[in-house]
């Protein structure tokens, strides 16, 4: 099984962006089904939320190398 450090060291920013966009698309599809009049979640809202979450996470051990 691949550990957390190894996995994220290999894939990086492009994978993170693709996952973020895919999740955003699905959230907006589901949101439209639940509340059709609800405004779509924007990329900027997602980026702001991710930034806030990143600030709260501790660094990986390899980041100090």
Image (cartoon, helix red, strand yellow):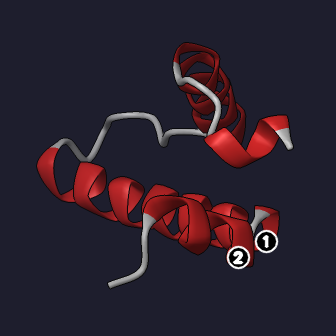
Say how many tags the image has: 2
The residues tagged by marks 1 and 2 sit, at their Cα atoms, a distance apart of 7 Å
Q: Quadrant of the C terminus?
A: top right
Q: Please say if 41 is above or below 11.
A: above
x, y percent for residue 53: 53, 23
- 27 horizontally vs 62: left or right: left
| Residue beneath disc 1 | 14
Q: Quadrant of residue 2?
A: bottom left
x, y percent for residue 33: 18, 58
Rendered residue at 56%/23% (across/down):
58
Say the numbered circle drawn on residue 11: 2
Q: Please say if 45 is above or below 24.
A: above
x, y percent for residue 29: 33, 64
Rendered residue at 62%/65% (across/down):
8
| Discs 1, 2 touching: Cβ within 8 Å | yes
Q: Please say if 8 is above or below 36.
A: below
């Amino acid at each position: 099984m691949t550990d957390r450090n190894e996995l994220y060291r290999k894939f990086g920013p492009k994978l993170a962006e693709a996952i973020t966009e895919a999740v955003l698309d699905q959230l907006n599809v589901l949101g439209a089904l639940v509340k059709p009049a609800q405004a779509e979640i924007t990329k900027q809202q997602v980026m702001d939320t991710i930034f806030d979450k990143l600030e709260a996470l501790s660094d990986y051990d390899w980041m100090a190398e």
